[in-house]
Image (cartoon, rainbow, N blue to C red):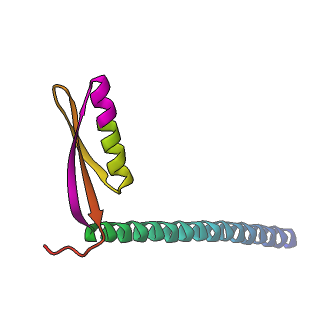
């Protein structure tokens, strides 16, 4: 009977250790999940802030620059596009033509929209 009690106490002790070890693992997992949620929340918040900032911008000017695919036209068009980019214009899109492309560039400002 005493051997049986020792065996039972030993098994109970092993179970307590196993439960404690599993509890510690669960705690670590919960901490990691908490950090991941916090990081995701911060990234989403930044994306929302960036989106709101972009939404407030207003196009101030638009340029259409033709770039012809011939030795002289390419350099002239390239210079015009580079000059516009240096002035703060951003590419919006481009259209293919029979002789080359037309670049559409926009200059955006930080003014409140007045829709």
Out of 64 and 16, give the one closest to the viewer. 64
Task: Using the image, determine if residue 91 lies above or below residue 96.
Answer: below
Total of numbered circles in the picture?
Answer: 0
19 displayed left or right of 63: right
Residue beneath the point at 54% across and 71% down? 34
* Residue 52: x %, y % from top left: 31, 71
The furthest residue to the top: 70
Residue 111 against residue 82 in the figure, above or below = below
Q: Which residues are magenta?
A: 58-76
Q: Residue at x 31, y 30 (%)?
A: 74
Q: Was residue 6 drawn as part of the magenta stretch in this picture?
A: no
Q: Can you say which quadrant of the picture contains the N terminus?
A: bottom right
Q: Nearer the viewer, residue 85 or 2?
A: 85
Q: Residue at x 60, y 71 (%)?
A: 31
Picture coordinates of residue 89, whole percent (x, y): 31, 54
Q: Nearer the viewer, residue 10 or 48?
A: 48
Q: In the shown orientation, is residue 88 left or right of residue 13?
A: left
Q: Quadrant of residue 16?
A: bottom right
Name the foreground residue: 84 vs 112.
84
The extreme right residue here reads: 2
**Does the magenta-highlighted stretch encompass residue 60?**
yes
Residue 59: x percent and y percent?
22, 62
Q: At 57% across and 70% down in the image, what residue appears?
A: 30
Q: Quadrant of the C terminus?
A: bottom left
Q: Quadrant of residue 97?
A: top left
Q: Position of residue 77 (x, y in %)?
A: 29, 37
Q: Is residue 14 left or right of residue 37?
A: right
């Amino acid at each position: 009977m005493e051997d049986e009690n020792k065996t039972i106490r030993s098994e109970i002790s092993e179970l307590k250790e196993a439960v404690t070890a599993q509890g510690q693992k669960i705690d670590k997992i919960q901490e990691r999940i908490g950090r991941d949620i916090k990081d995701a929340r911060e990234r989403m918040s930044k994306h929302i802030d960036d989106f709101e900032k972009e939404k407030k911008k207003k196009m101030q000017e638009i340029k259409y620059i033709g770039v012809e695919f011939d030795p002289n036209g390419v350099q002239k068009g390239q210079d015009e596009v580079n000059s516009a980019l240096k002035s703060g214009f951003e590419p919006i899109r481009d259209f293919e033509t029979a002789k080359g492309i037309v670049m559409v560039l926009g200059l955006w400002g930080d003014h409140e929209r007045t829709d």
